[in-house]
Amino acid sequence: MKRSYIIGLALAAAVGAGTANAQELTGTLKNIKETGTITLGHRDSSIPFSYLDDNQKPIGYAMDICMKIVDAVKKELKLDKLEVKLNPVTSATRIPLMANGTIDLECGSTTNNAERQKQVWFTNTHFLTASRYVSKKASKIEKIDDLKGKSVVSTAGTTNIKQLTEANAARNLNINIIPAKDHAEAFLMVETDRAVAFVMDDILLSSLVAGSKAPGDYVISKDAFSKPEPYGIMLRKDDAAFKKVVDAATAAVYTGGEGQKIYDKWFTQKIPPKGLNLATPISPELKNEFAKPSDSPDPDSYK
């Protein structure tokens, strides 16, 4: 009698513990568990990070990393299946849509900086870039000061347009700054001579040039508006439990060698839909970051 009573208590305790564990889920993990869905924010034209293929399906380097996170979340929550919903975002809408709960992860080319960390959080860095400009070779815009008095485009809602605005004021350049809704529209303005230059992250400029009608007509500046800046997958602020799962997932991908394979697939080989090859081998800085994953917003920490 006594033994069965003890077993009964043990079973009750186990059931209670199970119930408590289920109740312990909060924030994003709780919502994913209850709905059986996770929503990924994706871009339309941030090649090769997040963009649409010929079938209007979001693909890219950041999308591949996000799918690894999805696998880890599914495993963490012990779900048989996890539905992935895809929600388009732009530079201007990505942070509001993250903050209001529309998307759970933002899979793109978003710079992790201290200012943004007041609104959102980021997981471990997956790329390092610097803010430069692309122009037509014929324009002979060789340095930032050559932009004086000219029309220059950048994408609305980006750190790049902010850096351009600050440089414009600091150097008294009297630049006519044009905000574009996305990277494709901005590059088209340079292509059609409505702007002499487009200020954006150098890797995104490389992809736009590679995919243009006449890649040989363009040059990307050596002059930069910024130090090397980290890109990270974005998630909601103040959700430590979800961030722990996401950080562990990305760290496993980067330190285990999978990160290098995913990188090579998108940056050193032909990519759909046009078979472009960005021919951009991994940098020593990013290789070091993969060996010791970090979510630091400080450019100096990636030297």
Image: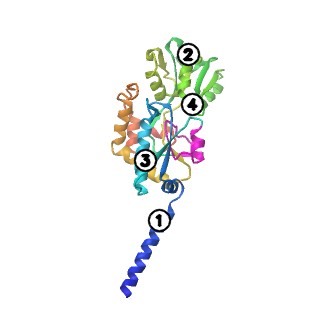
Q: Residue 21 carries which label?
A: 1
| Amino acid beneath label 3 | Ile
Closer to the eye: label 3 or 4: 3
Task: Residue at 59%, 17% (x, y): give it.
Answer: 194
| Quarter of the image that includes the N terminus | bottom left
x then y, percent, for residue 36 = 47, 53
Contact (CB < 8 A) between labels 1 and 3?
A: no
Mark 4 or mark 2, which has the lower sequence index? 4
User: What residue sits right under mark 4 in the picture?
Assistant: 160
Residue 115 visible within the image: no
- For the residue pair 105 and 257, the one nearer the viewer reads as 105
- As measured in the structure, the alpha-carbon distance from the residue carrying label 1 to the one carrying label 4 is 44 Å
Q: What element carries label 2?
A: loop
Q: Residue 247 location, x and y as percent?
A: 44, 49
Marks 2 and 1, how far apart at CA: 59 Å
Q: Is mark 3 on a helix, strand or loop?
A: helix
Q: Does the magenta stretch include residue 208?
A: no
Which of these two is toward me, 82 or 48? 82
Residue 69, labelled with which disc?
3
From which residue to which does the magenta span run?
A: 93-121
Residue 142: in sight, yes or no? Answer: yes
Question: Of the residues shown, which amino acid type is indicated by label 4?
Answer: Asn
Q: Earlier in the sequence, mark 3 or mark 4?
A: 3
